[in-house]
Amino acid sequence: MTSRNWVELIVFTVLFVGVAWMGFWAAKWKAGQTMDHLDEWGLGGRKFGGWITWFLVGGDLYTAYTFVAVPALVFGAGAMGFYALPYTVVLYPIIFLPVVRLWSVSRTHGYVTPADFVRGRYGNRTLALMVAVTGIVATMPYIALQLVGIEAVLRTMGINGSGLIGHLPLFVAFLVLALYTFRSGLRAPALIAFVKDILIYIVILVAVFYLPAKLGGWGAIFDAAEQKMSTINPATGAPSGNVILTHNNQLQYATLALGSALALFLYPHSATGALAAKNRNTLKRNMIALPAYSFLLGLLALLGYVAIAAGSKPVNNQATGKPDTNTIIPVLFDGQFPSWFAGVAFAAIGIGALVPAAIMSIAAANTWTRNIYKEYINPKADAKAEARQAKWASLIVKFGAVAFILFINPQFSIDLQLIGGVIILQTLPAVAIALYTRWLHSWALAAGWVIGMIWAVATLYSIPGAPGTGKLHFGGSAITFGKISFFGWHPFSGALQVWVGLVALVLNLLVAVIVTVVLRALKVPEGPDATRGRDYHADDGDSHVRAVAAEH
């Protein structure tokens, strides 16, 4: 390890340790009467105001994977990597009203997870179980991908071993995360999110002004990017990428952006950040203000082109012997900035992994506890038993994420995250549409979920990886029209690509509508609706709203 890397490592470690201390201290911050309740441990007492919610939700949605993988995708493929920008621009107008309605009905009844709402709305425990399992399955690789961001930083600083020893620093980092999350619950990532976002904004704003000036301006940067993208890739016989979208991938870009926007707030961790807000106005103001993060995301994405102009090369992963493209932004900072500033940038990325990883593990633990453990294993569990179960479940989730990195190729985990959006989107009819109408029969929703999920997974399985990767299955989340098959029927032709998730959602909804019509005609009964119209407009302080940390 060089002296330069030692400076980076010391700065990184000091900031990391400081943040860990904040995580343990957070248990006393805005503390309620007890931490033995999911309202307190899992939702921070449901009393976060505007600024805290801003940093918490922003820290939850804009993860370390975003900071390393979006610019890495731009570095490798060009224009397609910018899909994350329109995705986050259209996201907030789409979910502005639904997420406020979800907050109100959840606050009224004490719901902690989206599956809680489905259970109350339809009185169908099987449908709620489907939503809960889908959320946990889609979240696990998402947590693992935060490790990819930390490992990219560690690898750039020279910690690049193979086997268990090579992963030891990562294991230690997540052990610390596990301990302070166990103690402090959602308050820990909410407090740490302040530090994370301040560091990220400082680092990115310095980078987008300093680096172009150093490298000859944005004109020279785009010229270098265009030259690289037009170079023929020997493995494919085609250009490496495109600075401008082509005819064949424009639809893929649009459907991926729209589908990702529809899917994001269906994840349990996204709902967790929203449900922790203290009232409806807090959430509304945040939905209006959060698009400011999209500006930051656009600047981050451009750093992929900056890395091309700077001649940055990914660090080889000693465990696989192949270049790790996720290291491209850490390498850029390592080569273009003084060691102390590179250390600050690396700490920003590392801390940027801790915040969402903590929220995701808490959300998965809440879902397991409320919708599986209490529903099927221990129905008599009181609030204290729920909180205890959630704390231990959050530890298991974190170490399960570490197992992803230890035993599965990290690149495969990244593919799983893209596929995760396809999977979680299949819960949209049962969660989002149910916020407005109960016309769709609960068993029809279950049937739609089954058909949509089977088709989506089978289609994703049939998609090979890029030439040279050796991957025969689960190689991406887009498919050409000509290869779309509905159980043997090929209704389309052509080379246009479309995101699998939206096609599966359309199939899901079509099945749900048809089965609903049949079940309604047969007068098949369904469970009672525990919610009322006024519940979807309730606010903190209303007389019919359940008290925070009340016993169920």
Image: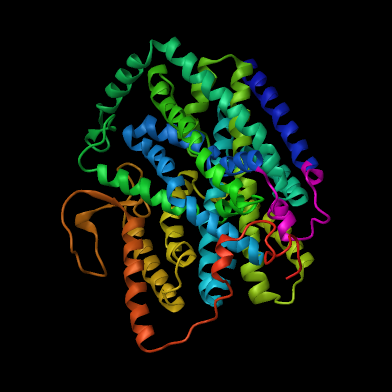
Q: Is residue 48 part of the magenta span, yes or no?
A: yes
Vertical placement of residue 280 versus 168, above or below: below
Q: How is the image coloured?
A: rainbow
Vertical placement of residue 547 versus 144, above or below: below
The magenta span reads 26-49
Viewer-proximal residue, 336 or 505?
505
Q: Which quadrant is the C terminus positioned in?
A: bottom right
Residue at image position (40%, 19%) is 311
Percent x, y for residue 206?
53, 18
Left or right of 301? Residue 204 is: right
Q: Which quadrant is the N terminus positioned in?
A: top right
The extreme bottom residue here reads 522
Q: Is residue 299 part of the magenta span, yes or no?
A: no
Viewer-proximal residue, 298 or 281?
281
Q: Image quarter for residue 58? A: top right
Left or right of 309? Residue 273 is: right
Percent x, y for residue 270?
55, 51
Vertical placement of residue 372 versus 31, above or below: below
Residue at image position (44%, 78%) is 443
Percent x, y for residue 535?
58, 66
Q: Image quarter for residue 348? A: top right
Viewer-proximal residue, 401 or 158?
401
Instruction: Please say whether residue 266 is visible from this viewpoint.
Output: no
Instruction: Please say whether residue 28 is visible from this viewpoint.
Output: yes
Q: How many marks?
A: 0
Viewer-proximal residue, 501 or 544?
544
Percent x, y for residue 198?
62, 28
Residue at image position (55%, 59%) is 102
The extreme left residue here reads 493
Residue at image position (38%, 22%) is 308
